[in-house]
Amino acid sequence: MKRTFAAAAVLLVSGLASAQGTGWYGGVSVGQASVDLDNVSRDIAAEVEDMGIPVVSASEDDSHMVYKLFLGYKYNPNFAIEAGYADLGKYDAKVVGDVFGESLDVRGEVKSKAVFIDAVGILPLTPEFSMFGKVGAAYARTKAHASATFMGFRESDSESDSEYVPKAGFGAEYALTKTVALRAEYERYFDVGDEDKTGESDVDFWSVGLKFGF
């Protein structure tokens, strides 16, 4: 009986460990991203006031639901390479001014997305649980759109920027089955966008997801 229990324990541990074994894997994560807008709404409000227009309100939304898809190859228990696509979210700023009782509505919207590649260092703590850190690069595309509406008339303008940016992150992973693991992580994309055209900001990306071994 003891041998039976021992054999079952060995099979269980080896099965869970294989979820963290070498080879190909992929997955999907969802979460929340935020940016440092450097008080974009404040800057827009200042420009509106410089034109002699009183500002009624100013607001900004600097966080958004996001997702990413990733594919990786684990070379050994301590190192992997990952690549994928990330939606970095949409961020808004709004300012309302008053012109002789009529509202001047000024809005700005910024969207970013990226493809990335990371080198991942892994620290197994138990057969099921491990922690990891990553450094890499992303090719980020950012689009900015601004508009002003007054008495039914509307003017708008758009800018875009594409560039390579550095990124880094860390997280933890827990093997649920032989081929499925739960992952939680934090990543930062540095200097996304162009300061003069779309605005520039770091993007903080918090997510949870599932990893599937092939």
Image (spheres, helix red, strand yellow):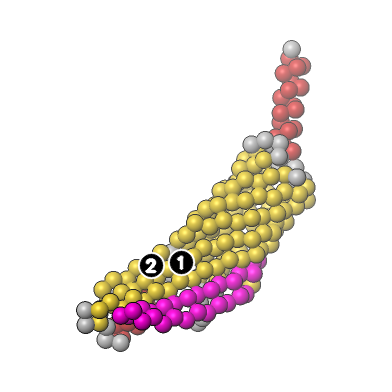
**Residue sitting at x 61%, y 43%:** 182
Q: Quadrant of residue 152?
A: bottom left
**Residue sitting at x 65%, y 42%:** 181
In the visual, does 170 lie left or right of 21? Answer: left
- Residue 140 covered by magenta stretch: yes
- Residue 68 covered by magenta stretch: no
**Residue sitting at x 66%, y 49%:** 27
Query: What x and y, as percent, mark residue 130?
Result: 64, 43
Question: Which mark, residue 60?
Answer: 2
In the visual, does 211 lie left or right of 103? Answer: right
CA neighbours of label 1 inside 10 A, class few (<14), some (14 to 19), many (20+) = many
- The magenta segment is 136-163
In the visual, does 182 lie left or right of 9? Answer: left
CA neighbours of label 2 inside 10 A, class few (<14), some (14 to 19), many (20+) = some
Name the kind of residue labelled 1 in the image: Tyr
**Residue sitting at x 62%, y 45%:** 210
**Label 1–label 2 contact, CB within 8 A:** yes
In the visual, does 6 lie left or right of 41? Answer: right
Q: Quadrant of the N terminus?
A: top right
Residue tagged by mark 1? 91
